[in-house]
Image (cartoon, rainbow, N blue to C red):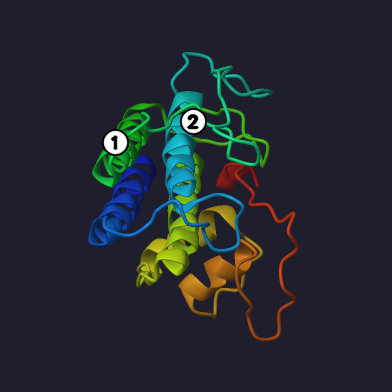
Amino acid sequence: MTENSSGARDVREAVDLAIATLQTATDRDWHTPAAGLSWSCWETIEHIADDLFAYATQLTPRNPSRVTYVPFGWRRGRHGAPALTVYAEDGASPEGLLQVLDSAAGLLVAVVEVVPADRLAYHPYGVSDPSGFAAMGVVETLTHMHDVARALDLEWAPPEDLCDRALRRLFRDAPTDTGRWPTLLWATGRGDLPGRDRRPSDWRWDGSPLATA
């Protein structure tokens, strides 16, 4: 399996797990604040979809920029809400929002599968390649689902191997001898690890290609 195919598979797995979990909670109030955020659970799910779309479309130009995002328009639904290009239409049901998430994931999966493995595109945390953007999609999905799951009282513990691959790609300073999911939460400022200082709020991953890191 190529590095691109592995990344695409991981995005699909992460989003499929998120959708399956959220499908058990469509009768709950998704407009309650997500844990640790000023966004609602609904807005946080939209943010995941928007990130997946953005990561895909950074890679699709024939000659991607390495200094700026593709200039898609965006909007905020209210003061303090996430800035979004992709969002569910007004009046959409939770099932409709999950369809938006699924669609954006499918776009990133397809793009990562087909673009050259050495294609590079802009991200403020490091100009990155398809495997990097795939790992970003995984991290955004897993960690923001943690925020939503806490608010909606849902069980959420993604597979250790999925977390490990994302950590190894984006968080090269993270310990390798600790639980992979707790470590990913620590790396993204959401949890503690014994013997480690808590990560500051301005934590970053390193999206630069592994060969040049």
Q: Looking at the rendered structure, which numbered label has been put on residue 58?
A: none
The image position of residue 168, as x and y in percent, is 52, 60
Residue depicted at 31% across the width and 35% down the height: 92
Q: In the image, what residue type sits under mark 1? A: Gly
Looking at the picture, tell me which residue is in the foreground, 7 or 150.
Answer: 150
- Dividing the picture into quadrants, the one containing residue 20 is bottom left
Residue depicted at 49% across the width and 55% down the height: 144
The image position of residue 151, as x and y in percent, is 46, 65
Vertical relation: 37 (above or below) 107: below
Vertical relation: 137 (above or below) 174: above
Looking at the picture, tell me which residue is in the foreground, 163 or 191.
Answer: 191
**Which residue is identified by label 2?**
54
Vertical relation: 20 (above or below) 182: above
Give the secondary structure at mark 1. helix
Q: In the image, what residue type sits under mark 2? A: Ala
Q: Earlier in the sequence, mark 1 or mark 2?
A: 2
Residue depicted at 53% across the width and 14% down the height: 63
Task: State yes or no: discs 1 and 2 in contact (Cβ < 8 Å).
Answer: no
The image position of residue 59, as x and y in percent, is 47, 26
The image position of residue 123, as x and y in percent, is 62, 34
Residue density around tag 2, few if under 14, some if 14–19, many if 20 or more, within 10 Å? many
**Which residue is identified by label 1?**
106
Looking at the picture, tell me which residue is in the foreground, 196 or 37.
Answer: 37
